[in-house]
Image (spheres, grey):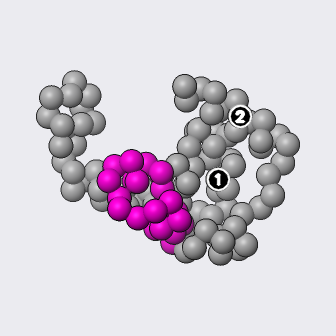
Amino acid sequence: MDTNSGDALDQLDDAVAAAAFRRLVRHLRHRHDAQNIELMGLAGFCRNCLADWIRDAGYAGDKEAARELIHGMPTAEWKATRQKPATDEQLAAMAASIAKNA
């Protein structure tokens, strides 16, 4: 834990943060009706971003393993059973939202 940061979030106990992260991931697994494209359009991140972030934080698995961990199933299965085609409106909202991340 970084105790030198001025951000109170960095003072959050790692066990508490980990428990909250796991709850978020399990919530997203349950709410597969919330499509990644919609999450990207609204908040500028999605399940795949979480997979990238755990790799950035030191998770030893490759990209596919990280996505499987977050999705709770292999990516191909997720796409076949959960992912719907994106609309032009969703793609435009995602692009506008991602621009805010910079």
Name the residue: 40% across, 54% down: 55
Let me know if residue 97 appears in the view: yes
Q: Which mark is residue 36?
A: 1
Is 29 situated left or right of 54 in this image? Answer: right
- Report the side of 75 relative to 1 (left or right): right
Q: In the rendered structure, which amino acid carries the disc numbered 2?
A: Ala
Return the residue nearer the eye: 73 or 17.
73
Q: Position of residue 58 (x, y in %)?
A: 32, 53
- Whether label 2 touches label 1, CB < 8 Å: no
* Residue 18 percent location from the top left of the image: 29, 56
Which quarter shows the N terminus?
top left
The quadrant in which residue 89 appears is top right
Secondary structure found at label 1: helix
The amino acid at mark 1 is Asn
Q: In this orientation, which residue lies closer to the viewer: 13 or 1?
A: 1
Q: CA distance from mark 2 to mark 1?
A: 13 Å
- Point out residue 67 in the picture as x, y percentages from the top left corner: 52, 63
Q: Most prominent secondary structure in the magenta stretch?
A: helix
Is 101 above or below relative to 66?
above
Residue lying at the far left of the rendered structure: 3
36 falls in the magenta region: no
Report the magenta residues as a range.
Answer: 50-72
Q: Is residue 62 above or below residue 53?
A: below
**83 horizontally vs 88: left or right:** left
Quarter occupied by the C terminus = top right
**Residue 95 tag number:** 2
Residue at horizontal 79 percent and vertical 52 percent from the top:
86
